[in-house]
Image (cartoon, rainbow, N blue to C red):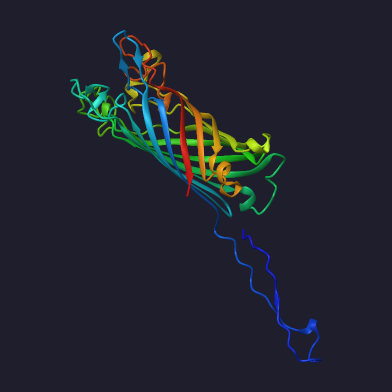
Amino acid sequence: MSFRCSALAATFTFGLAGFASAADLPVKSNPPPDQPFFFVVDNRATVSWMPNGTDPGMFTVGPNGAIDPTTAKLGFSLTHFDAWAYGTNLVSISMFKAGHNDPASPCINAGLTSNLTPGNCAGQTEFYGLVRSTFGWNEIFNTKAFTIGPLRNVSFEVGADGQNSNTFLAPAKRDVVAGLQFAFDLPYKGYVNIAPLAFWEFSNHNAFTQCGSAFAPGPVAGFSCNADGNVSLRPTWAVEVNYYLDLGFLPPSLQYFSISGRAGWYGPKGDKRGLPAFSGLGRFSTATATEFNSEPIRLTFDASKAMMGPKYSHLVDLWVAYRYWQNKYGMDHSAMPGVCTIAATGQSTKSCTESTVYSGVTVKF
């Protein structure tokens, strides 16, 4: 669809009395300018600090036997959002730098190298990328039939995710998603989007189960070890939800705050090691579980609007949020021996659940 602005026609009159009436004179009009291809473009940079992050299988055990899976993480993110005539695009790239409790290779855990000798490794560095695109049915079919009450639109949604980190595990997650998005309006210019999706993690990597590794469970490629460490998991379901709401009910002197949040449920996707011989039942299972990755609430203070006025709204945001991630990366927090639980006892390492308050600064550019 093309969005056009109205334009005024310019008329030219001749100074010859009696030559023609005003209605007979020619009218010259310029075509109205087209709307830019992307009529919304929003780019932001974020620095965040997470004091109690986790990574499955990474933990220390204190002298009294207490398990500590937490590690501080410093994050840097770039986010791009745009809207065009038929939908929207979101691209996000993040880097997270962890502390020593979540070490890089060659350590396999804090203070322990891959040859099972003591070692002091730097914290790991993780890169994560996400893409989501929508194509609105109202726009595609040139109708308003999919705007009913609070429902603003129904859209096709597609996307992909990728992750790499320099741990000994050397994960290289690649997945694709496809489905629908239902967009609803909320008061005070808010919204909530609900997207039921198909999810397929078609590629990842696990150095622990690579044939030839000291940790590989056996010599038979594809059954008890992976030839090159690469694994492919089965397609499953997912539901992603996100919302935003200005706190417009506050007095004008306090209308600098907004809340937002997100949640994602991802169904079981087979054996996390990609090895059918090790999928079993009970507390020693390596089968994946339903993953719940959420930021239920983020409170944002529009610092630039408060200091410089509405013209600079959301140029600089300060925020604090709570993050809860159960069965991280699909790891069953009550099983997964040697990762989510102590293999000998079944005791939880607490590393497959992340629960932390964190904060950051976001700048629009």
54 relative to 239 in the view: left or right: left
Q: Position of residue 205 (x, y in %)?
A: 31, 33
Residue nearest the observer in this picture, 143 or 246: 246
Is residue 150 visible in the rendered image? The answer is yes
- Residue most extreme to the front: 307
Is residue 294 visible in the rendered image? The answer is no
Quadrant housing the N terminus? bottom right
Q: Position of residue 87 (x, y in %)?
A: 57, 50
Residue nearest the observer in this picture, 90 or 336: 90
Q: Position of residue 286 (x, y in %)?
A: 36, 21
Say which quarter of the image contains residue 155: top right
161 relative to 302 in the view: left or right: left
Q: Position of residue 79 (x, y in %)?
A: 46, 44
Q: Residue at x 64, y 62 (%)?
A: 4
Q: Residue at x 19, y 20 (%)?
A: 118
Say which quarter of the image contains residue 130: top left
How many numbered marks have been drawn onto this rendered protein structure? Answer: 0
Q: Residue at x 33, y 22 (%)?
A: 57
313 to 113, vertically: above or below = below
346 to 328, vertically: above or below = above
Q: Residue at x 80, y 81 (%)?
A: 23
